[in-house]
Image (tube, rainbow, N blue to C red):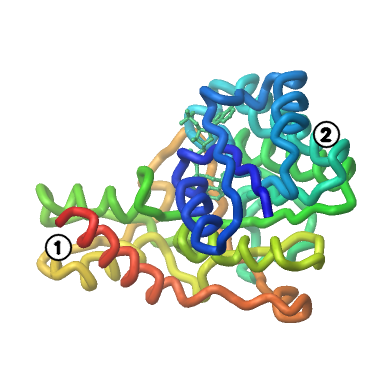
Amino acid sequence: MKVVVTGSEGQLGYDVMRSLLRHDHQALGLTRELLDITEEEKTLNTLRELAPDAVIHCAAYTAVDDAEEDEKRCHEVNALGTKHVAMACKELDIPMIYISTDYVFDGSGEKPFEVNDIRNPQNVYGKTKAEGEAFVENLLDKYFIVRISWVFGIHGKNFVKTMLQVGKTRKVLQVVNDQVGSPTYTKDVAEFLMSLLDSRVYGIYHATNEGYCSWYEFAKTIFELSDMKDIKVEPVPSSAYKTKAKRPLNSRLSKENLQRSGLSKLPTWENALERFLSEISDHNK
Ligand SMILES: NC(=O)c1ccc[n+]([C@@H]2O[C@H](COP(=O)([O-])OP(=O)(O)OC[C@H]3O[C@@H](n4cnc5c(N)ncnc54)[C@H](OP(=O)(O)O)[C@@H]3O)[C@@H](O)[C@H]2O)c1
C-alpha cells in the first residue's frame, strides 16, 4: 500500500514510518516543511499528486500548555488542518487514520471512557483535537479515529526521557499521583495502526498500552527499571503542580471494542517501558 504520513518527523510519525517500511508498504512522509496542513489548497493538491491508498494523520499542535495562549494557531492546525486532510481523503475515496487523544474527555469519574462517550475537553488542545475528530466523522465514511495517551518514543521529548534526565542531577522528585492513565509506546501504536490498514473495521478506537497508573507510579517504575532506585519519588496532588492547561484526572480509556473488531490489544505499559528503555540504551551506545 502507498501510505502518506503527516507529521512524519514527530514522535509518533517517526515510528509509523519505520513500521510501514517493515510491513513492506510504501511510506511517504510529510514534514511541516513539505506540507503545512493549515494550507487548504496545498494540502488538497499535495495529496492529489501523491495519490496514496491511505493517510495516517499524525501531525498536530501538541504543546498543550502553550495552546492556552495560542488558541488560534492550535485550532488552525488541529481542527482546520485535520479538516483539510479529511477533505483530500474524501476526494480520493481513501481511508484516513486520525490520531487523537484522551484529552477530548473531561477526566471525570474513575471508570474508563468508552469510545462513544461524550467529548467534553477541558483545555484548548483537547478542544481542537475534538473539533478535528468531528470533522473526520462528519466528512468521511472510511475513517479510524485512534485515541492515544501519555506517549513515549525514541524520536521526541517525553516523560520517560525527562525523568531519566532529571534523575541525573536530583535525588528527590515530586510527581503528581492523582492523574491516572496509560503510558503508551509509539512503536506499539505504530504496529496497531498497521493492523488497521489491513482491515475495514472503521470507527473509533483507543490504542493505549494495557493497564493504568499515575504519573507518580510511572516515574517510580522508570527509575526501578533503570537501576536508579536511589532516587526518591514523592507523590503530590495536581494542585501542587500548577500548569497553564488543566489536565484530566481520569485518563483511563476503555479498549472493549478492540476484540469485537478482531483487533489485538497492546502489551502492558510496564512491558512497553522495558522495551523502550532498552531501545534508548541501544540508541545511546
Ligand atoms: N505526545 C503525547 O503524549 C500525545 C498524547 C495523546 C495524543 N497525541 C497525539 O498523537 C499525535 C502525534 O503526537 P506526537 O507526540 O508525535 O507529536 P509531535 O512529536 O509534536 O509531532 C507532531 C508533528 O506535527 C508537525 N506539525 C505541527 N504543525 C504542523 C502543520 N501545520 N503542518 C504539518 N505538520 C505540522 C510537527 O512538526 P514541527 O515539529 O515542525 O512543528 C511534528 O513533527 C498527535 O495527533 C497528538 O495530538 C499525543
- Residue 200 in the image, given as x and y percentages of width and height: 81, 65
Q: Name the residue under label 2.
A: 87
Q: Which amino acid lies under the numbered mark 1 shown in the image of this protein?
A: Ile
Circle 1 sits in a helix, a strand or a loop, which is it?
A: loop
- Residue 182 in the image, given as x and y percentages of width and height: 50, 65
Determine whether 148 is above or below 253 in the image. Answer: above
- Residue 161 in the image, given as x and y percentages of width and height: 28, 51
Residue visible at 51% across and 69% down in the picture: 209
Circle 1 packing at 10 Å, graded few (<14), some (14-19), many (20+), is: some
Determine whether 31 is above or below 259 in the image. Answer: above
Q: Which amino acid lies under the numbered mark 2 shown in the image of this protein?
A: Met
Residue visible at 52% across and 40% down in the picture: 8
Residue visible at 19% across and 48% down in the picture: 166
Figure quadrant of the C terminus:
bottom left
What is the C-alpha distance between the residues marked 1 and 2?
50 Å
Figure quadrant of the N terminus:
bottom right
Q: Residue 231, which numbered label? A: 1
Residue visible at 77% across and 27% down in the picture: 44
**On the rendered structure, is 95 left or right of 172?**
right
